[in-house]
Image (cartoon, rainbow, N blue to C red):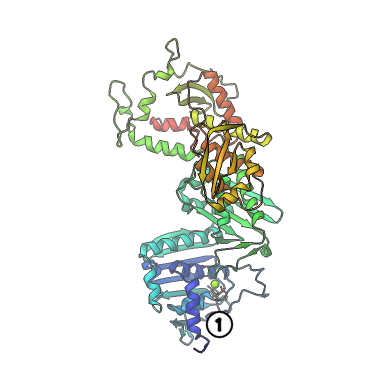
Amino acid sequence: MSIRVLPSNLINQIAAGEVVERPASVLKELVENAIDAGATEIDIVIRQGGRSFLSVVDNGCGISADDLPLALERHATSKLKDDNLFSIHTLGFRGEALPAIASVSRMEITSKVSTASDAWVLSVEGGVKSPLKPAQCPNGTRIEIRDLFYATPARLKFLRSAPTETNHIVSILERLALASSHISFSLKDENKTLCNFKRGGIEQEENLKRLSDIIGKDFSSNAIHIQAEHESLSLYGWIGIPTYHRNTANDHYCFVNGRPVRDKIFNAAFRVAYQDFMPRDKFPVGALFLSLPLEEVDINVHPAKTEVRFRDQDRVRNFLISSIKHHLRQSSSQNPQHLTNALIDRLMPTLPLHKAEAYNPSIPLRATQNNQRSYVADFSFPPSPSLIKEGGARDVSVEIIGHQMDHQEDIPPLGYAKAQLHTTYIIAETRDGVVVVDQHAAHERLVYEQLKCSMKQAPLARQVLLIPDIIEIGETKCRKLLQYQEDLLWFGLMIEPFGKGTILVREAPSILGPTTQFQGLIYDLLHEIEDLGEAFSLKDKIEEVAATIACHGSIRSGRRLTLPEMDALLRDMEKTPHSGQCNHGRPTYIKLEKADLEKLFGRR
Ligand code: ADP
Ligand code: MG
């Protein structure tokens, strides 16, 4: 067999295999080119999920008639000015997208530079160029792609349905639009507008607006603004408060030096920073814009340029985690507004819509659509057993029990307790509303925060297990875990090797109940250790480990509380960071403003 150099169109098709996975990747390359060309308006039209037609029109610098044929040559670019792969200011630099796309589709590029009087058009079919022709076009570039993958039918078979491909396109465009709030973007499918981002005034405001368009209308009122700097690293963005979570990591929007990336370092940072406040199967949302010197990051990892490699991974990772944590801590008292809104939304349809229909005690409770009794009726109903103190009935009228609020005094944020319901909920009156506290969740959080504190000072008390627990985890994991044998003692866990791939738990933290499943705890700890990367001491990771341990412990459950006890709990919550959600990310309290109540009762 003799060796031959492949024909150039085949080389381009091979490159297309990596660069052009689906219509969305074509869109990404073309829009990146438009952004690099300095455009301020980018308009996209697609048909059939981009498979039969995809066009991108920009008002950027354009391509001159001389350069047009060159733009379609492999490895031809205007962007690597000083031949330095570590000083890339543009989104593109590899000079391979246009020839790759042209090799698998029918492409037409029309472009006009502002200094020329005419526009020129170049057509390519399956990589074969036709001669340049004069054309009509305003300053900028229009690229039309037809019949994507017609030249590589095998690829065509991998495409999904038009709506799925359209979703991919929207998702890519959203990411690019988030990174470039100084540019207007529109995306149309036939005549339907799928995205419309207008460039606005202040960049950061526009950014938050776009994020809310993408993540959800209520994101902006449930977002924490992030701004952090450390040595050469800087970060800004918005993250959701911990009770605002999702079932997937799809709403993590991550950018490095203005480039949308999908890097596990960001996902890991989100997970580690929020793990204290979120159930394991939920994901936070938010956008993180990281900037660092160009020479500290390599973007030439994959042709699609969505992966990056940091010179110092751990430094970036720690910076991201500590910045997110810091801001979470600072805003831990932020009211979960989306929960109040959701509650109101849920209650509204069950409420009498007209004032004439208002609650009348002689009419039996109405069942709501989903057969739940109306919450409102519950609140206004006769004494619940938990309101009756041992030894005698207690006045139910919420107005006269508990702390008497004086209009002059400073009322604390969570107000004063007025009642306890179902030995579970504390109702407190605040200056301008009502707070309902899940006493168990709140207490769990307080205990956990104390636990974290005390663990920083002294080892956790241990208790010998009556029957040591034997857990099989495999040899690699065993080796990994046993490296931390010493460290784990601090956390109240005494483990020993116990033959092939097995460990034995001899002593465990006394705070963990007798029914604790150590298998789960050990697996979670391993997960933690693998997650945290190499070479660290578990003691530096008290919070992470404490969270894992606390998660498996059972902490005192709800009981009847006196009003002073309830008030004390409220005051503790105000003092304790992160008391707005329990360890599993559920809220510990819900707040209803007076205005919300007025809305509910049709007074507004
Ligand atoms: P790269 O972006 O990596 O340079 P491409 O194959 O995507 O490679 O594009 C090749 C060249 O074509 C670019 O370097 C640029 O000079 C030119 N070009 C492509 N699209 C546009 C556009 N929309 N406006 C102006 N120039 C463009
Ligand atoms: Mg490009």
In the depicted view, which residue is nearer to us: 84 or 592? 84
Q: Position of residue 90 (x, y in %)?
A: 60, 68
Q: Position of residue 53 (x, y in %)?
A: 39, 72
> What is the residue that sits farthest to the left in this orientation?
363
Above or below residue 1? Residue 426 is above
Quadrant of the drawing holding the C terminus: top left
Kindly indicate the quadrant of the structure image that contains residue 96.
Answer: bottom right
> What is the residue that sits farthest to the bottom in this orientation?
2
Q: Which residue is mark 1?
A: 70
Kindly indicate the quadrant of the structure image that contains residue 144.
Answer: bottom left
- Residue at image point 46% right, 22% down: 420
Instruction: Please indicate, yes or no, whether residue 419 appears anywhere in the rendered image.
Output: yes
Q: Residues within 10 Å of mark 1 (few under 14, many from 20)?
A: some
Looking at the rendered structure, the kind of residue marked 1 is Leu
Instruction: Please indicate, yes or no, whether residue 287 appears anywhere in the rendered image.
Output: no
> What is the residue that sits farthest to the right in this orientation?
231
- Residue at image point 66% right, 46% down: 537
**On the picture, is 377 further left or further right than 446?**
left
- Residue at image point 50% right, 25% down: 428
Above or below residue 309? Residue 74 is below
Confirm or reject: label 1 Cβ below 8 Å from ligand 1: yes
Q: Position of residue 462 (x, y in %)?
A: 60, 32
Quarter holding ligand 2 = bottom right
**On the picture, is 473 further left or further right than 148?**
right
Q: Position of residue 192 (x, y in %)?
A: 37, 62
Q: Circle 1 sits in a helix, a strand or a loop, which is it?
A: helix
